[in-house]
Amino acid sequence: MRELWRGNANAWECDEMGHLNVKSYLAKAMQAVARLIEDAGLAGAFRPGATATVQTGEIHIRFLGEARPGAPLFIEGGFTRIGGDDADIALVMRHSGDHRLAATLTWTVRHIVPGSPKAFPWPSRFQSAAGDLTASLPDEARPRGLDASPGCQTVSLVQAEALDLFQLGLGRFGQEDADVFGAMRAECLLGKVSDSVANFAQAFPDRQFGATDDPRGGALLEARIRVQRWPQAGDGFVVRSALAGMTDKVRHIVHWVIDPVSGKPWWTVEGIAATLNLRTRRVEAASPDELTVIGKAVRADLRG
């Protein structure tokens, strides 16, 4: 793998949990993806006026080592598969000081014309250069709590109502959410969900902040994102969510992010989350009473 990004966890990128917010992992990883694509011969693919760029299709991420405010970080990566018009990328984020793992990501991209969802073949110069930028998928990057089952094909607002999914978020994509082509930036795939999960009291009755000796919050351990359509600045969204399963220590969360006007999906997120003690920085198990409450949020066989 080659180095594709180096920086740090800025204080303003961290959240009430005291660590780097999930959307900032994607923002930094997207910079690494862009570096790799340019190194493979697509210079200018992320500038205004580009005639070709790449679009994200699916992301899998594991959060393996907290990045606290000020933590120096770097990302290495490479192509694990190069198709005719798409590619798979593996990224590994590490702490710069001791090289501890911070996160791993696998990222699928498609070669497109900006504004068009249709993929078209890579140019020959890309195929040649990308062949020298390949990498093996690290074991740590393989899914652990999420299986390889196909995504749900019936995601819609109508189906969300039928399943009685909880409404966690409702909003609109602004110019601040858009890339140079006017489409939503990749970090919003987790950012809009992260901004909404504080409302998911049904799944996290054990969260508690404020004046307590043991403040607790929800921490995402693993996630898979599947993009079905890319919103533009000005589009609206609603986040509908429930649990697909649970144990005393983890919750299998499913979020559907939907266009409230058309009722069609924008993207889905499946995640494995846990309750984190913010003093000890350790995962805590839910009590029997809390498990009874959490169980009411489960929708069997729900998928993202």
Image (spheres, rainbow, N blue to C red):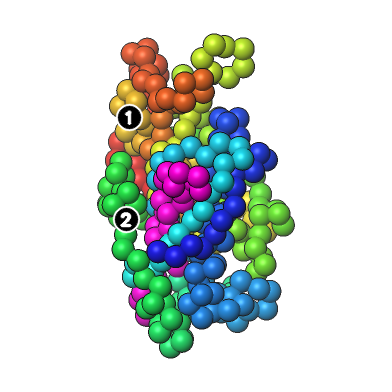
Task: Verify CB contact (< 8 Å) between mark 1 and mark 2.
Answer: no
Residue 247, percent from left and from top: 30, 27
Look at label 2 and name its amino acid.
Pro
Which quarter of the picture shows residue 31? bottom right
Residue ID at (37%, 31%): 251
Residue 170, which numbered label? none
Classify 91 as above or below 120.
above
Residue ID at (32%, 33%): 245
In the displayed structure image, the side of residue 117 where residue 223 appears, left or right: left
Residue 186, percent from left and from top: 55, 57
Query: Outermost residue toward the front?
Result: 97
Classify 113 as above or below 125.
above
Asked if one can make out residue 42 in the rendered structure from this viewpoint, the answer is: yes
Identify the element where label 2 is drawn: loop
Q: Nearer the viewer, mark 1 or mark 2?
A: 2
Quarter of the image with the N terminus is bottom left
Q: Nearer the viewer, residue 99 or 207?
A: 99
Classify 194 as above or below 118.
above
Query: Outermost residue toward the bottom?
Result: 124
Asked if one can make out residue 157 in the rendered structure from this viewpoint, the answer is: no
- According to the picture, the residue beneath numbered tag 1 turns out to be 246
- According to the picture, the residue beneath numbered tag 2 turns out to be 138
Q: CA distance from mark 1 to mark 2?
A: 27 Å
Give the magenta-colored segment's residue range.
82-109
In the displayed structure image, the side of residue 117 where residue 222 appears, left or right: left
Residue ID at (56%, 56%): 6
In the displayed structure image, the side of residue 278 where residue 142 appears, left or right: left
Residue 133, percent from left and from top: 40, 73
Look at label 1 and name its amino acid.
Met
Identify the element where label 1 is drawn: strand
Classify 196 as above or below 285.
below
Prevailing secondary structure of the magenta residues = strand
